[in-house]
Image (cartoon, rainbow, N blue to C red):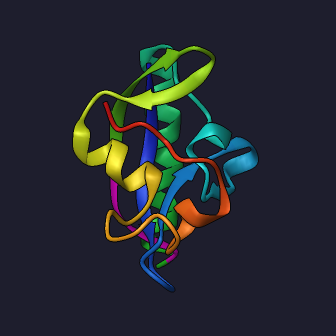
Amino acid sequence: MKLLAANRLLDGTAVWLGPDAAWVEDISDAEIARDKEGEARLEQIGRRALAENLVLDIELIDVEIVDGAVRPLRLRERIRAAGPSIHPELGKQANKPAVSLV
C-alpha cells in the first residue's frame, strides 16, 4: 500500500494526496493506492500539482494499517506525519493526540 506525500509550496507543510485530488494535512485522510494502477493515478495527479506549483517533493511512500491507523514504514515519513519533533505543544501535533513514531 502506498500514498502520495508532498510539501505544500505555499508554506512547506507536509501534505498527502486525499480523495478528489485534494491535498490533506492529516495522513489519515490520504487516499491509499492498493495496486500499480492506483499508484500511477496518484503520481499523475501529483505531477500535475507539481507543474501547477501547488506542491513540491512528491513521493510515493509505503504505508501499513496498524490498529486502523495509517502508519508510514519509514521513520522519516512517520516524523513528517506526526509534525515537528521539537515540542509536542507546537506544530500540527498540538492539534491532536500524540502519535507514536515506533
Residue 5 percent coordinates (x, y): 42, 50
5 is higher (above) or lower (below) than 95: above
- Which residue is outermost to the right? 20
Please report the residue visible at 56 percent of the width from the left and 28 percent of the height from the top.
32
Please report the residue visible at 57 percent of the width from the left and 48 percent of the height from the top.
17
The N terminus lies in which quarter of the figure? Answer: top left
Q: Can residue 60 be seen in this view?
A: yes
Q: Which of 6 and 66 is in front in this view?
A: 66
Please report the residue visible at 45 percent of the width from the left and 50 percent of the height from the top.
81
The magenta segment:
54-59
**Position of 61 compared to 14: left or right?**
left
Quadrant hosting residue 25 = bottom right
Q: Which of 75 and 18 is in front in this view?
A: 75
Please report the residue visible at 31 percent of the width from the left and 30 percent of the height from the top.
102
**Position of 79 compared to 8: left or right?**
left
**Position of 3 compared to 61: left or right?**
right
Residue 20 percent coordinates (x, y): 75, 46
82 is higher (above) or lower (below) than 91: above
Characterize the magenta stretch by its predominant secondary structure: strand
73 is higher (above) or lower (below) than 45: above
**Position of 60 compared to 95: left or right?**
left
Residue 26 percent coordinates (x, y): 61, 51
- Which residue is outermost to the bottom? 10
Residue 59 percent coordinates (x, y): 32, 47
- Which residue is outermost to the left? 75
55 is within the stretch colored magenta: yes
58 is within the stretch colored magenta: yes
Q: Nearer the viewer, residue 88 or 23?
A: 88
